[in-house]
Amino acid sequence: MDSSRAKRFGKSCVNGAAIALLLCGTAGGRAADFSFESAGARFGFGASSSNKDFHQAEAFVDWNLPWHWDLGRKWEVQTRLDLSAGGLADSQAGGAVGTVGPLVALGWERVPLSIAGGSGPTLLSRWEYGTKDLGDTLQFTSHIGLYWDIAKHWRLGYRFQHMSNAGISHSNPGLNLNAFALSYRF
């Protein structure tokens, strides 16, 4: 790893650590139990013409982290840990993908909708797909989405996600996906 690449990687790690500390800070929040929140499957496809041949399928598990904030008037922010594993493919090749990272969900007690976003490191078993070179095994995936609790234990979701290597590699085209999920809520 050359020195400029090492510096960019170090900066990415520092930024990630700062976000994790911010999420884990309990100022204004209250501790709760670390518990399973949901588990399910997600399927995504390319969100732009340059990513149109890509698709991703994965299983995921979300845990409630022990910090959440009551914002008053039945609004609540909940921190979670998202872990996923699956496959990423285009029309020519396929490989494994795995991501782990924090997310923050905002919901209102009286409405079965929530908004969630997060970011985390992603590992790829391959980073070259046809003519698209994603640059490296290590990527970072950021996402924001809308979720609908359709029944007591079932949730449908949509999220837009962006995966890139944050400039730690010479090639960093990024990959944008639209992803849909079905999950069981514990």
Image: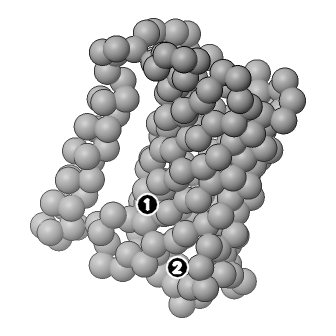
Q: Nearer the viewer, mark 1 or mark 2?
A: 1
Is 139 displayed left or right of 186 in the figure? left
Q: Quadrant of residue 184?
A: top right
User: At 52% from the left edge and 53% from the top edge, which residue is drawn?
Assistant: 143
Q: Considering only vertical position in the picture, is 31 above or below 86? A: above
Q: Residue furthest left?
A: 3
Q: Which of the image's four quarters has the N terminus?
A: bottom left
Q: Quadrant of residue 49?
A: bottom right
Q: Which of the image's four quarters has the C terminus?
A: top right
* Res 59 visible: no
Q: Quadrant of residue 39?
A: top right
In this view, the residue in front, 8 or 176, is 176
Q: Secondary structure at mark 1?
A: strand
Q: Secondary structure at mark 2?
A: strand
Which residue matches tag 2? 128
Residue 107 screen position, x and y as percent: 60, 30
Q: Which mark is residue 184?
A: none
Q: Considering only vertical position in the picture, is 81 above or below 76? A: below
Task: Please name the colour scheme applied to the rendered image.
Answer: one colour
Which residue matches tag 1? 139
Q: Considering only vertical position in the picture, is 35 above or below 56? A: above
Dot 1 or dot 2: first in sequence order is 2
Mark 1 Cα within 10 Å, few/some/many (few <14, many 20+)?
Answer: many
Three-letter code for the amino acid on which mark 1 is drawn: Gln
User: At 47% from the left edge and 54% from the top edge, which residue is drawn?
Assistant: 142
